[in-house]
Structure formats: C-alpha cells, structure tokens
Image: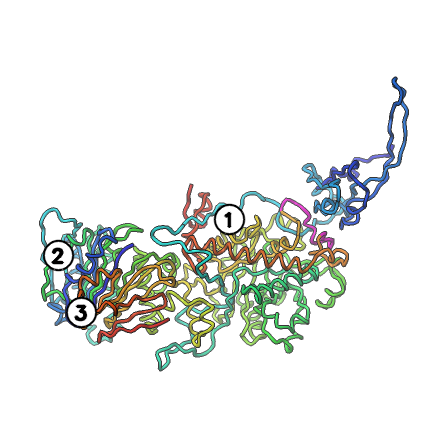
Amino acid sequence: METVKVQDITANDLPWVIRYDASRCTLCGSCVAACSFRAIEFKVERRRMVFSEGDLPEPKQRFSAVPVIRQVSNLKQYCRGCGICTKVCPNDAIEAVRNPDTRHPIVIRCVAGDSIKRGGRKNLEAGTRTLDKLRIGRISQMTDPSLDAQRHTFDLLAPFGRIMPPGKLPFRIGADGKLEPEGQAPPVRWIYPVVIGDMSIGALSWRMWEAVAMATAYLNEECGLPVRMCSGEGGVPVRLLKSKYLKYLILQIASGHFGWNRIVKAMPDMIEDPAGVLIKIGQGAKPGDGGLLMAQKVAEHIQAIRGVPKADLLSPPNHQGLYSIEESVQKMFLSFNAAFKFRVPVAIKVAASATSVSVFNNLVRDPYNIVGGFFLDGIDGGTGAAHEVSLDHTGHPIVSKLRDCYLAAVSQGRQGQIPLWAAGGLGRAGDLAADAFKMIALGANGVFTGKLILQMAGCIGNEMGRCNACNTGLCPVGITTQEPRLVHRLDPEKAAQNIVNYFLAMDQELKKLMAPIGNSSLPVGRADALVATDRGVAERLQIQYVC
Amino acid sequence: MCRIGAIKSRNYIHPSRALLLMQSQQKGHDNSGFAMVMHDLGGIFKPYKHLPTLSLACTNEGVRIAEDMLHAAGFQRVMQWMPETDLRPGLDINAMPNYIFQTYDYPKFYKKEDRQTKEDLLLDMRLKLRRALEMDDQGYVYSFWPDVVTLKEIGDPKDIGTYFKLWEPNDRFTARVITAQCRQNTNYDIVRYAAHPFFLQGYTALANGENTFYLKNVELQRKLHRGYIGFESDSQCFLYSLHYVHRQLGWPLSYYKHVITPLPFEEIETREDRTSLLAIRQSMAHLEINGPNTIIGVLPDNTLFTCCDTKKLRPVVVGRDADTVVISSEVCGINEILPERNWEKDIYPHERETVIIDNQLEVHRWRQ
C-alpha cells in the first residue's frame, strides 16, 4: 500500500474529473496524444481477479497488468474540461466532468504562492444577463407598418470618426444654391455596426489571426458588408501593412506600443490608409491592468513582429507618457491624426467604469474635433490572459454605462458627435444580433466583439469554467497558441468561413429586428423600441417596464 | 391615419374651402378636431401684413393675462377680430370661452430693429404668453406672427365649422395659403397644441403618419433651439427640422428632404455631391425620420411644399387649375374643390420627390 498524505493533490481537488470507461477503451491513445495540457496519461494498473470454477466456492485469484488511461493529478497539468479527449475518442470512453467539490482556487494559491491567471471571460454571475431582460417591444402595427426584412432595403452602417454638429459643417452655399464643401472636416468612415474586436497576433495563433483577416476581406469584397477588424496590440505582419487589405484593419496602439516600430517603418510603403487607429487605454475584462502575453506564447514570429526577446510581455496599466485626458487628446490623438495626415479616424477604447461618463464628457468637449470614437468595454469581455481576481471581480457592466454615456451626450445636445461603440459579453448567449440591436437602441452606434469570434472559429471555452486556458499557450483548438503542433489543428479557411457565415446570419437577424419596428436606418438611441421585464433595469435605463 | 390638406391660390380664399377639402376625406379620420393655419392674409387683416397677429383661444382671465403682458412689453394693439360664434345646442365642440385675433404694432424701441431681432422678439413673447397661460389652463397661444392666423379646436370639424360660421364664405376672413387637418392627436394626449398644423416663426408643417424616430428627434431638437418645445405630437419634429435646416442653418429647402430622409449610403456614393450629402447624413442622423409620413410645409415667403418618407408609405396628391393648387391626402378632396381641373395632370409625388408651389403658382418637382 502506498503512503498517502492528506495534502497530496488528487483528481477530486481539481476543477474537472475524468470519467473513463476501461471496458470501452481500445487503448488507441488518441486522447492522450490530443490533450494539450497533458492532463491524462497512460498507466498500467495491477488488477486482481478472484474467481471460482467449480460448483462449490473454491476461490482462486489471478493478477494481471492492465493498461488504462488516468487523470494526472498535478497543478501544472490539470484537466481544463476542454473535451478534446471526448472529441477524438472513437468509442465515447472518456469525458471530463465538472467537479462541484473542487478545491482548486485554494490549493493552487497555497501551492504556487502566485495569483491565478487564465483567459476567457468572467466566470461569476453567469446567470441572467441584463440584455436578456430587454425585449424589442414597440412593434409597428396599424399606426405605422412593419417593414419586410426580405423585400425592403436597410442601411446597416455605423460611423467611425468625429462627427461635426450641423452648424459647424464646413459648407457654403454655391451659386447654384447647392452646399459646397469649404475647408476640411474630420474623416468619418461608415462601417458595419459590428467590429471584430482587438485580439493581437500574439494572443491568437497565426492561423487564427489569418482566418479573421481572411473573413474580414471576404465579407468586404464578396458579401458587401464593410466589416472592420482591429489588430489588437502587437503589430501587424508587414505584408498585410503593405497590401490593399490594410483598409479593412483598425490599427491598435496600447500602453506597450508593441508592433508600432514595424508599422511606422511600413508607412511609406502603405498603398491604402488603415480603417482607423484605436488607442487602447483599458480593457473591460481586466480594467486597470495592461496586456499580458506569457513567454510561452512569444514565438519567433511574434518576437520578430514586436521586436522583443522571448519573455513575458507586460503592457503597463497606463500609457506612460499621458497623465490627463486633456493631455491625451492633445498628444496622442493629435499625433495619430497627424501621422496619417488627418485622413484616418482615431478612436479610444476604455474599460467601462464608474467614471466613464466623465471621460466621455471630456472627449465630447474636445475642441480639436479629433476624437473619432468612444469604445466602451464592459466587465463581461474576454481576454487572452489576466489575473483571475481581476477577471472575476473588477470592472463595470456595459449596459447601464453605455446608456449613461449616451444620455450624457443627449443632455448636452451632442449625441452622435463621438460615435459610441460598446462591448463586453455581447453575444454571450450566441445571438449577437439581438444584443447588438438592444445596445444600439440604448444609444450605441455599434458594438465590437472578440471572444465570440473565437467561438465561431471553434473555441470551446465558456463562462462555466470550461477551458479558459488562453494564457497557457496550450489552446487545444489551435486558436490562442503559438505551438505549431496545436496551431495546425485549426483549419484557417474553415474558421474564416464560419465567421463569414455568422456575419451573414447576423445581418439577416438585424434586419429581422429592424423590420418590425419599422426602421430602415439603425435605431440609435431609440430606447422607446425597448421594454424591460425587470423594474430595476427599466428604471435604470429609462425605458418602459412591462410585465 | 389622419388626412391633411393645403390650398394655395392666386386669390384670397375663405376657410370654407379648406373645410370642404377635408370633409370628403372624413372617413379616413376620427373627426375629433379641426385645425388650420392661414398665411398671406386677405380681408380685414390685409392692411396689417407687416404687423404680428396673435391667435389665441382662452378664458376671460386668459385674455386679461395676455393683454397685460403684451402691453407691459410695449406692444400696441391696432386691430382685433373675434369670430362670431353659433351657440346652438348639440354641436360637438369643446370650445374655449374666447377666440381672439389681435394685431399689434411693435414696441416703439423695436421699430428700427432689424427683422431678425423683431422675429426673435415675437417668438419670445409667444413663448412667454404660452407659459403664463399654461398655468391653470387659461388659454392657448397658437401663433404670434405677421400675416398668419391659426385656429385649433377639439370636436367634430363640421360642427367646429358651424360654431365659427366658417361654412359661410365671406371676404373678411381669407388667405392665399390655408393648411388644415381634421383630427386630434391619437398617439398621445388630446391637447389643443397637439393638433397639426404646427407653426414656428413663419414656418408651418403638418403631417400624416407616424414618426418612429420621434424620440431621437425630440432628444436632439430640445437642445437645438428655445422654440422647439411642446412635442405633444411626433409630427412637431418635422416642423422643427424644417425651421432648423431652412432658417437656422440657412440651407436651401431642397436639403430638408436630404436631412429627414437621407439617401441610402450606396446611392450617396454615386453622387457628385456625395461629400455634402454624407456630411449631412452623419451630422444630422438624429433629425432623420423613419416610419410612414407625408409632410406638407409652408415657408415664411408662403412657398408651399410636400414630401414623403423614404418608402412612400403614406399617400398624397397635388392637383391644380389656373388659379389654385391643392395638396391633399386623398384625391377625393381635390375633386370636391377643383372638380373642373384636368385630373390627368395631378401629381402623385414619389418617395424621392419634393413638390414645391411658388408664389407664381408654378409647381416644381425636385428629385432628391
């Protein structure tokens, strides 16, 4: 008998336990080979069989050595519940089961003496969401007709860029009585109201990033949907920077400035302007925290694009050169506007916070008209890597904060001047069209989404603690890893196709939501189209309560 | 669905023509009110075209309040007309005790002021009167403007006509432009201010439809101008956008259509004037309207026009003879008052069109 210490880690302490049926297993080894976490292994068990052959009990025993699969009980190589083993098993002989008695949050801290890090989205409060308490309840009937989603035309576009108030448009009336442009107005691009959120080429595998870029190009060139993707912080392959597809890409700069050396060097060779520049100040999933790319994901090509050695890449919580909003507008916005000769809109992304309205008000009053968008990211957003305590406990939900910002603009008569873009757990239930539509009715010009894009490509992580190992570089589906063996699991063309198809479905669904309220343009701020089934939500968002 | 109508003529015409225009369309509305705005006045108002006329429905106390306030502000009354009323029992009218049309001369110290200053004074005075009379429901000030009178009342339009003796044509109470509508607001509370046509600083608008971007329009318009108040009806937004585009921004009328029903982005891209059209669409997104709507408008120079929503979901027809042009929700109204016209020349405006009737009674059709 082996000696057992009570402090030893056993499968029962871990978040997932492996259920294995030896009688069905053919010992093909697929599951062990496929488990990127090495959370299962081969083992030979010594078995004793007691039997009796005669009419009367004459117990005999036989020992045998049986090869089996077993769970590794180790805090480095523990099961994340990704289910790849089940996926590859020809006989349904193995599965991971969520362990309600897990001691993992305690023991890992006790053993490692370090904070827990993981990827994915917030794991707490995974119950009913605010958006699920809203319905599109103002249906056009009798007084005005509903439109026909199939037959009528709809304008599903949202502005990206600083919009001048009508009285300040640089126009004069020409001799023929027509308005003629006089002077320059800030650049504004009309794009699809769903932007593919900022996920860096380091956080994503090269195949995944390529799939997103391919899907974006296809949606633009073949489907007529002007969808834009944001590069994330971490640079862009030089070949793309110099290609015509740059026009579909919003370049991001964050506090680490990763990748900008190459971007700046490629500027003389750019044949198209980028779709925009997004200055990332904060992220909804881990507000107040900078980006985090673990060394295990800093592969050679990442080192090349970012110009860094293989090491943990930590972006600071702040842009080191900025110390106030006014200064950020003057320094950062002006620099980036000037860099592309005021042809490219420059927007800002901040984490939703109790102070978001103050930040927004400051930007709305920007006297230089150079703030081209306010991207507000809520607590339910996803991330490639963060401290779990930040993920689960910091941040601010997006819905009421977006509404606050919109109403702050309304109270100043400045709605629409800085387009509002919202994110943070949108599409978490799978239907982004409904979430996007509700956010738009509450005042967003558009939404952006990241985690859902990964899920379209095959990410199996969820808010119930499944997988969420984006930080480890061991993504079992090849999406958030730089490990060639794993990356090759992802078929980039299939992933791109899924993204394209999802957008096409979503486009149809958005029309199916616009038609019954009789709108052919996006109903930005049309909160009268919404009703709430929760009194608190109704009151907070200033919409009608229904029961 | 309500019905709207407008008449513009070379000759001064009596409101009985407007009643007739609307009566044949009565099955289309619930006969819950009658409202009209008359521009370019004839009859007893003709000598006072340059002076503002107050259109007021109020209690006795309301008269006193209004007159005291106008007097205190330095306005001097030069003419007053109170329509004779028919008090026979059984009329379906929810009448106010007094209907007063008073023409005033400007305060002495304003006489040499420019037009803009005088127009601002008239607006501020009307808003002040409205606020004062709103307390205790003492009355309603519909307009205070040169060469314009307004009448609005709750009840059956036929009976309202009888009450004010509007069915009997005369040459004392006439105008060259009359816009009219025969229903009270159905979407919101019934209040006299909520009945079309709406009037602001020489601009009149009335609409048949449902502005589903009402909330968006209201939230912005509230901050655009002190005169954009009330919002008792979603159709007031059409008037305020007209006033904003044409008067405040000083843009030609053709841009009104581009503001309220902008072209699809795809089409804007193909236009020579795409820079301005795109800028309008993005800067004035909150003045865009949606839903089924037909609008009739009158400008301060008495130009009359009509346009529709982007999907042409509500009807309107324009008919004319040599001396008169009529805009009406239904052709039966025009048949009633211009039976001899050549109906083959009737215009059924489409979704991209603005039809304008100038003071020479020429009909222009502008394509957006």
Numbered disc 1: secondary structure: helix
Q: CA distance from mark 1 to mark 3?
A: 55 Å
Q: Residues at badges 1 and 2 in contact (C-beta under 8 Å)?
A: no
Closer to the eye: label 1 or 3: 3
Judge from the rendering whether residue B295 lies leftward or rightward of residue A333; answer left or right.
Answer: left
Q: Which residue is mark 3?
A: B176
Q: Horizontal and vertical percent for residue B70?
A: 18, 63
How packed mark 2 is, by other alpha carbons closer than 10 Å (few <14, some 14-19, many 20 or more), is some
Front residue (pair A542, A493): A493
Q: Residue B278 falls in which quadrant of the image?
A: bottom left
How packed mark 3 is, by other alpha carbons closer than 10 Å (few <14, some 14-19, many 20 or more), is many
Q: Horizontal and vertical percent for residue A533?
A: 45, 43
Q: Is residue A464 magenta?
A: yes
Outermost residue, bottom side: A175
Q: CA distance from mark 2 to mark 3?
A: 20 Å
Same chain under badges 1 and 2? The reply is: no
Tag count:
3
Q: Which residues are magenta?
A: A463-476
Q: Which mark is residue A131?
A: 1
Numbered disc 2: secondary structure: loop
Q: Is residue B298 above or below residue B188?
A: below
Closer to the eye: label 1 or 2: 2
Which residue does the image show at 32% across and 69% down from the upper left? B354
Chain of the residue where label 3 is placed in the rendered structure: B
Chain of the residue where label 2 is placed in the rendered structure: B
How packed mark 1 is, by other alpha carbons closer than 10 Å (few <14, some 14-19, many 20 or more), is some
Residue A539, visible in the rendered structure: yes
Q: CA distance from mark 1 to mark 2?
A: 55 Å
Same chain under badges 2 and 3? The reply is: yes
Q: Horizontal and vertical percent for residue A81?
A: 70, 44
Prevailing secondary structure class for the magenta stretch in the rendered image: loop
Q: Which residue is mark 2?
A: B164
